[in-house]
Amino acid sequence: MTTARHRDPAHSATPPGAPRTLAEELRIRPDDGLATLLHARPDLLTPVPGDLTQLATRAGTRASVVRALERLDRFALQTAEALAVAPDPCSYGRLAALMTGEDPGPDAAETARRLPEAVAALRARALLWGADDRLRLVRTARELLSPSPTSPSPTGLGPTVAEATSGMSPGRLQSIIVAAGLPPTHDPVSAVAALTELFEDRTRMAALLGQAPPQSAEVLDRLVWGPPYGSVTARPAPHLQWLLDRGVLLPAAPGNVVLPREAALHLRGGRAHRAPEPTPPELVPAAEYGAAAVDASAAGQAFTALATVEELLKEWETGAGPLVLRAGGLSVRDLKRTAAALDAPEPVAAFWAELAYGAGLLASDGEADERYAPTPAYDDWLALPAEERWLRLATAWLAGTRTAGLVGTRDAKARTLAALGPDLDRSPAPEVRARVLRLLAQAPEGTAVTPDSLLDRLRWERPPRGGAAAAQTPDLRSRLARWTLAEAELLGVTGRGAATAHGRALLGPDPREAAERLAPLLPTPLDHVLLQADLTAVAPGPLERPLAAMLGVVADVESKGGATVYRFTPGSVRRALDAGRTAADLQSFLAEHSRTPVPQPLAYLIDDVARRHGRLRVGAASAYLRCDDDALLAEILADRRSANLRLRRLAPTVLAAQAAPDALLEGLRAMGYAPAAESAEGDVVVARADAHRTPARTAPTPVPDGPPVPDETLLAAAVRAIRAGDLAATAERKPPQAPAAPPPADGRLPRTTSAETLATMQAAALTGSAVWIGYVNADGAASQRVIAPVRVEGGFVTAYDHTADEVRTYPLHRITGVAELADDPA
């Protein structure tokens, strides 16, 4: 780095007319430039700033700058990091040299080509301001990205010579510059300047380092790309002492040394970064399929997702749903039981439960013995077509912040996170899901990409905190991305790892298009089964809902898959009879919906169970048992297995029991009988499980990751309000001809008498000119406004308010003072 470069023209005085502050630069930006800023940094809109000075002040606050830096891509962030270690202000040429180096490498041309885009991105976000010859990074951003002993710079550079020698004795400084071959100076300031100039001069610095011992180069190689700090003993080795004597290494703390920034930049060839990354990593194809095959595979998985959610909620709708833990959530035991019922791993079962919960189909019932149960919205969901039911689940998943992948992990207090429990919200989840799906959609149709290349791309678009070191560990966003890939496949948003047509439409302006594209791909529900002689029924595909519901009562599911196998057993037939069906009903139902004749073994099974069903009647005494066949009662009374029921004969056809009716029913069924319960009137009680529903519940609200992005209407209104407020704050006011009181101090409201206020308002209404007023509203809040009076009467002034961009009426007694404007804003 030459001496001439050190005398950067950026260090000259500010050119006339150039903005001196960020507020001044914002003031000369066009309206679309302000809208771009507010769109990129929506936190600046909460609340809407009163003027551009407030906007600039808010844009420089630490929280807002941190949020803005986190939303830069890697190359824009590298550009900001380079500006943080450059002189302030910095010329564009100096910045380009820091990014490309003195000896441009193979990527220097691309870096130089993309650098204007990165600078423009920083400008658009108000992180950078000033002309190209005087670029200034916002002070808070410079503080965050500049190196310090406690917070190293992401560039790996250390402090400057001036910063590292701060507090060093003048005698020590003089000895360093003399050892470096420089003439002694009269004061420490000139000594530091001379040493800095030496390190920035490539020719003289190369000559100095050419005299160093060979071992010194090894030390510098370890420090040059960071961290720049090292430790030394009380008696350094000769090669270290040589570097210390000449200031190439400077003391940082007792026993520690640091490589100053200027020396490190010389060793790096002027580059701030080891490897600038101007272009995003490419997505690497993993496999290629036909687009039709991908869509068909995803559609099949989408239908499976609907069936799984329905099966889960049907399992929990009988009133015996899992209990809610005291701390909230599902117990490990209940999660295992649910996973077994769904024939899925526990993490997958947790995902389905969270999906139903996020879609508002599942909630706690709020009872004293609190349990999870379907909500009334579940019934409405069941009535929708399959593609709309899928869309409801997919949109809830895409926008939700609850993260099923965290189930089973531990929080900061070492507590295990439970499914459906608290603390599962992660606000970046919706953004990461959308980014993953958009990246998959960028690949050619039918092409799946490798997860590693996808993660590399995501890290480039949104670098993790902590720079390259943090990228080596699985940060939250990387884990969210991996979970997104798995969940999108389960839900049928992707197929075989590739984007689908309906998945692309899901990210479009109208998500209903996704349902329309999925509908033709979903399998058509069947209205028949195939009955077989081994007491099974095969459903060759998805069944229509009434058929599936009835078949689920009269038979047990034996296996699932492309074809579901149902098995008929005495217990399942008895369950159907308990539900109020007769043997004739069952025979007719099976004959109507089977493409094969009803097998004789199945007909015999139904008739046999029906013949024995209800011969025994159980009622309440504590309980009683009656039967027209006294021999059967004698058989039961003599059976040793009935001892715990404590039966005794009251009449030839009646036995009394001291067990409860339900216990008596279960006991007799365990003995192989088929009793039926009866009411007090002697009628058979139909035992049908009632569907349990919670009271009306709303779906969980996602936890936003900062303020929402404003739409165009809000942006336009906000820009108008800020411009009007800035006009009111900066407009030049004419002093009154004969002020009744001294002019107010800066920042105070103007003061005029009531007569002066009325006269000025009437004159402005006649001439159509604008005036500046101080106004105090009914709540006592004071503000300054620019208005154009239209009518003054009855103690009120009706005027067009430039600040609010609308016509308003103001009571004259609330106007503290008025002044004419030097230049009419109209």
Image (tube, grey):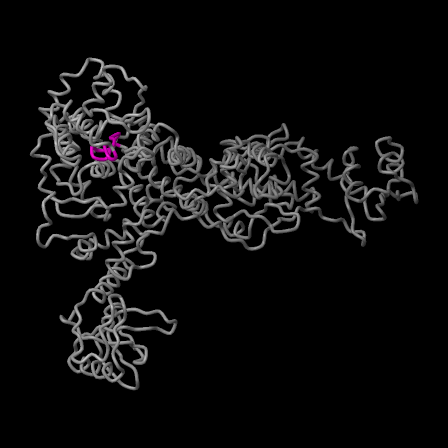
For the point 16% across and 76% down, the residue is 769
Residue for point 11% across, 49% down: 14
Does residue 161 show up magenta in the picture?
A: yes
**Residue 155: where, in percent of width, then height?**
25, 31
Q: Nearer the viewer, residue 656 or 200?
A: 200
Q: Main secondary structure of the magenta part?
A: loop
Q: Quadrant of the C terminus?
A: bottom left
Residue 826 visible in the displayed image: no
**In the image, is residue 56 part of the stretch drawn in magenta?**
no
- Which residue is depicted at the point 22% across and 17% down? 216
| Image vertical order of residue 335 relative to residue 509, above or below | above
In front here: 685 or 70? 70
> Would residue 816 appear left or right of 378 to someone viewing this image?
left
Where 136 sits versus 455, above or below? below
Q: Residue furthest left?
A: 4
* Snapshot quadrant of residue 615: top right
Vertical order, 334 against 216 (above or below): below
In depth, the one of 662 and 580 nearer the eye is 662
Q: Position of residue 783 (x, y in %)?
A: 30, 69
Q: Quadrant of residue 488?
A: top left
| Left or right of residue 422, residue 733 in this image | left
Q: Position of residue 668 (x, y in %)?
A: 80, 37
Residue 251 at x, y percent in the picture: 27, 27
Q: Quadrant of the N terminus?
A: top left
Q: Is residue 661 rendered to the left or right of residue 106?
A: right
Whether residue 372 appears in this view of the structure is yes
Of 257 and 561, the residue lying toward us: 257
From which residue to which does the magenta span run?
155-167
